[in-house]
Image (cartoon, rainbow, N blue to C red):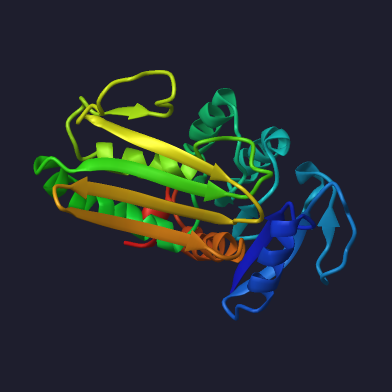
Amino acid sequence: MIRVILHGCNGVMGQVVTGMVQADPELELVAGIDINTEQKNGYPVFGRPADCTVEADVLIDFSSAKAMDALLDFIEERKIPAVLCSTGLSEAQLARVQEVSGKAALLKSANMSLGINTIFKVLKMVAPVLAAEGYDMEIVEKHHNRKLDAPSGTAIALADAITEVLPDEYTYTFDRSQVRRKRDPKEIGFASVRGGTIVGDHEVIFAGTDEVITISHTAYSRAIFAKGAVAGAKFLAGKSAGMYTMQDVIQ
């Protein structure tokens, strides 16, 4: 049985993860950490990481950037493997994550979805073939009307998966409204849509002469991110110190 501490347990995603962990016979949720210390799911909840004295095999984090500094101190002190799902970390915090990974196993990815991470692998296979044949590459992403950033971090990660296996001369184009010129064959373009309650929709378009190939992913629920985090926790428990991603989980 893998013992789990859930950081951000009383948030929206924390409650989704709670349900998944408690329904999994391989896992036991032994404690939560949250500024809201209400104990509503049968496990103790601590207001700060430093207050948590419960022993565990892995930690799952679904909180916020402002809670990350104290959490990383806790992980470093306890040397507990941790799946980090909070977004919007500063450059200083990302550097701290790398530092702490020297003492504990950490898993962090741009997107925790198993489907999206499988697409990363697919793109690395097909992009060199299609790019060599002159296919134009564009990424379209759609999200709900409350999302602040554009393009999404996942859209950038999709492009990064492509450029990782292509020559360095490819560039990213985020806005074509300010210029009047033909498309550069060595660019990857981005388009962002914001509206309604769209959880997340990403399309990678390879447009060639007389044919278009589209690789797409649609998230219908945020539960897919919780599912990925749970899979990551199972993978990470017992691992030696280092930096891991969801690509390691789906190998």
> In the image, what residue occupies the spot 44% across and 39% down?
191
Up-down relation of residue 167 to residue 131 (above or below): above
Which percent across, then down, holds residue 54?
A: 75, 58
> Based on the displayed image, in which of its 4 quarters is residue 172 positioned?
top left
Q: Quadrant of the C terminus?
A: bottom left
Horizontal arrangement in the rendering, residue 222 relative to residue 112 (left or right): right
Q: Is residue 184 visible?
A: yes
148 or 238: nearer the eye? 148
Up-down relation of residue 63 to residue 213 (above or below): above
Horizontal arrangement in the rendering, residue 31 relative to residue 111 (left or right): right
Residue lying farthest left?
133
Up-down relation of residue 169 to residue 132 (above or below): above
Which percent across, then down, holds residue 6?
A: 69, 57
> In the image, what residue occupies the spot 17% across and 43% down?
135
Q: Quadrant of the N terminus?
A: bottom right
Up-down relation of residue 22 to residue 249 (above or below): below
Q: Is residue 108 visible?
A: no
> In the image, what residue occupies the spot 64% across and 46% down?
78
Which percent across, then down, holds residue 174?
A: 42, 29
Which percent across, then down, holds residue 85?
A: 58, 49
Residue lying farthest right?
38
> Based on the displayed image, in which of its 4 quarters is residue 9 positioned?
bottom right
> In the image, what residue occupies the spot 34% across and 38% down?
160
Residue lying farthest top?
179
238 or 154: nearer the eye? 154
How many numbered marks have been drawn onto this rendered protein structure?
A: 0
Horizontal arrangement in the rendering, residue 214 relative to residue 111 (left or right): left
176 or 84: nearer the eye? 176
